[in-house]
Image (tube, rainbow, N blue to C red):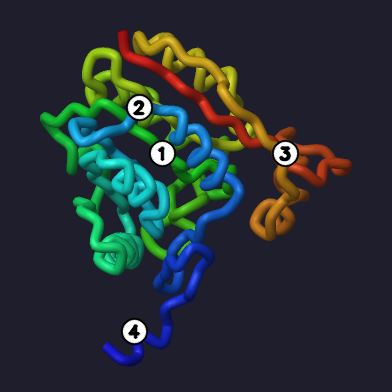
């Protein structure tokens, strides 16, 4: 236990993170701002897909919502549970695939900051920190699953909030959600400097037609969908 404690990273806002856990960044805060506009309360059932440190799930819990958070990474699950314990907030954190862990349940609000970075390998990583960002050749491996599964996860009038890179095709996300019976729109955008992962893949991204040599910033989008 002492060695684990020493390896914890201290983050802004008093959060902690085990090694390899995705730390809150621009996409996290953009989604947090969108979540702040939603009506959350003691009777609101909320699901976060891919919780990481639990920062957003805890934000929802502070407003009284009953929050379930899911992540495929054990270090992320442990981190989110620890952050919830440190804040004395009720947070149900589950390990595994979001579809398998939520079978038969429906929620008022579902939100996610999923992996969305295009990667040269079409296979999703099975371990390591890259699980938090690598999402197949077009960056849509997880996004498309959320679009397909959202109708079965949401109660009537339920809300889906999802943030991802414009590089992945925001219009395709809107079309997929509409095709699944969920009218959707882009409610927020932000332009942020490329991070180290994108910079390391610049040549490959240019070859794939996903970026140009002049690009230095990435557009982020928040998409909001509602079940009728």
Residue 209 at x, y = what percent? 74, 33
Count neighbours of disc 4 (C-alpha within 10 A) and say few if under 14, some if 14 to 19, many if 20 or more.
Answer: few
User: Residue 149: x percent and y percent?
Assistant: 30, 26
Residue 161 sits above or below residue 122 on the image: above
For marks 1 and 2, the one nearer the N-term is 2
Is 116 displayed left or right of 88 in the figure?
right
The residue labelled by disc 1 is: 112
User: Is residue 157 visible from the viewing direction of this image?
Assistant: yes
Q: Quadrant of residue 218?
A: top right
Depth check, mark 2 against mark 3: the one in front is 2
For marks 1 and 4 on the same chain, the one whose residue lies earlier in the sequence: 4
Circles 4 and 3: CB atoms closer than 8 Å: no
The residue closer to the viewer here, 131 or 18, is 18
The quadrant of the picture occupied by the N terminus is bottom left
Near-viewer residue (224 or 32): 32
Q: Can you identify the residue that label 2 sits on?
A: 39
The residue most toward the bottom is 2
Q: Residue at x 14, y 34 (%)?
A: 103
147 in relation to 194, above or below: above
Q: Is residue 74 left or right of residue 24?
A: left
């Amino acid at each position: 236990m002492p060695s684990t404690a020493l390896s914890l990273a201290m983050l802004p806002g008093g959060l902690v993170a085990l090694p390899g856990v995705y730390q809150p960044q621009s996409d996290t805060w953009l989604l947090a701002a969108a979540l702040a506009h939603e009506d959350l309360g003691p009777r609101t059932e909320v699901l976060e897909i891919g919780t990481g440190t639990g920062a957003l799930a805890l934000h929802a819990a502070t407003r009284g919502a009953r929050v379930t958070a899911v992540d495929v990474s054990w270090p992320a699950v442990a981190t989110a549970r620890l952050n919830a314990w440190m804040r004395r907030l009720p947070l149900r954190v589950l390990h595994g695939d979001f579809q398998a862990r939520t079978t038969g349940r429906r929620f008022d609000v579902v939100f996610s900051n999923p992996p969305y970075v295009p990667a040269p390998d079409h296979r999703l990583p099975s371990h390591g920190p890259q699980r938090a960002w690598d999402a197949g050749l077009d960056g849509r491996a997880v996004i498309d699953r959320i679009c397909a599964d959202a109708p079965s996860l949401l109660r009537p009038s339920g809300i889906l909030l999802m943030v991802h890179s414009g590089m992945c095709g925001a219009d395709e996300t809107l079309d997929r959600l509409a095709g699944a019976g969920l009218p959707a729109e882009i409610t927020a955008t932000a332009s942020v400097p490329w991070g180290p992962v994108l910079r390391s893949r610049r040549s490959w991204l240019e070859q794939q037609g996903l970026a140009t040599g002049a690009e230095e910033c990435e557009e982020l989008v928040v998409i909001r969908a509602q079940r009728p």
